[in-house]
Image (tube, rainbow, N blue to C red):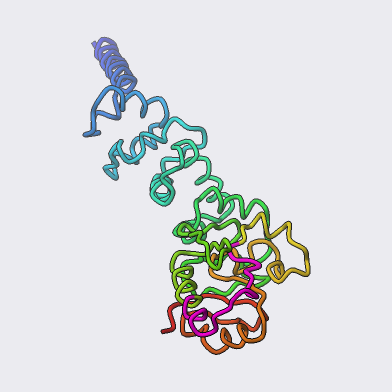
Amino acid sequence: MVFKRALLVVAIVFIFVLCFTHMNDNFDVLSRYPYQNEENRELIRNNLDDVEIEYIIEFDIAPAYFIEYVTYDGFDIYHIDEYNTIKDADPSLSDKEVVELTEEMIALDLYDEIVELSTCYDVKMLMEFYADDVDGTLACPIELSLRLDDQVGVYRYTPEDLTEKEILDQKVILRKEAITKLEEMMTKMQDDIGDLSSFIFTHSYVSYDKQASLDGDDVCSSYASGHSDHQLGLAFDYEADEEISSWLSEHAYEYGFVSDGKSFHLRYIGDGS
């Protein structure tokens, strides 16, 4: 009798273990996930482990927030906030690039700095800057008052509002606001002086790559590429006779231009009238 009772207990335990194992093997952790469709379910099951699935369930993270990234190498469910921040900062990036670049930023401890600078530069350019190990600090060229020098630069930045115009039959390229004030200034100077035939624009906007090709004695190449205010589209160099130079020294500030201490060089800092 005792033997039969023991045998019954063993059988019950065996059946319980068998049933529990079967249920456990067939348990769908996504059964508690409210965002159900077969496509998302398959992607999540194939790319996230049970711990990661528990994470998206616990924090109620909808597939729309991460599903486009989940199949790419290096994807980390715990970095989805960072992925979406980078995507918002630079919508031109593909989802694959978002994952790859974000993971690289995090690994190099550059994420916060790149997010801050992404209001002024595209993300790929920023990654290129750090990969090139360029000397100095990268500045955000939003303010007209930004001053560049051998330690503060703008790398391969190109102003979006560059405007080309013919002034005194010469091609000049500056940012829109600067070239508008330059036209006003030159019109007034011509009214006051008359003959401006001695005035020559020697430089206006100069790109990052063009700076590298200029002679070392050139005013525009006083600093290495990326460190000249000509790249900001706010400065120009010129040649002129003494009468014109004197007029500019006296009146240029009225139109927002200052010399910055350089001869035959004017830099726009904002409307001073």
Which sits in the foreground, 267 or 110?
267
Horizontal and vertical percent position of residue 73: 51, 33
Instruction: Please identify the residue farthest to the front as the structure is shown.
Output: 195
Kindly identify the residue that appears in the image at 56 percent across and 55 percent down: 109
Which sits in the foreground, 208 or 96?
208
Position of 166 with respect to 242 (left or right) is: left
Instruction: Please identify the residue farthest to the left as the structure is shown.
Output: 34
Task: Identify whether 64 is placed above or below 238.
Answer: above
Image quarter of the C terminus: bottom left
Which sits in the foreground, 15 or 175?
175
Kindly identify the residue that appears in the image at 33 percent across and 37 percent down: 54
Horizontal and vertical percent position of residue 202: 66, 67
Horizontal and vertical percent position of residue 23: 28, 20
The image shows a total of numbered marks equal to: 0
**Residue 202 falls within the magenta-colored stretch:** yes
Residue 201 falls in which quadrant of the image? bottom right
Which sits in the foreground, 101 or 158?
158
In the image, which residues are magenta?
187-205
Residue 197 falls in which quadrant of the image? bottom right
Image quarter of the N terminus: top left
Task: Identify whether 237 is placed above or below 121.
Answer: below
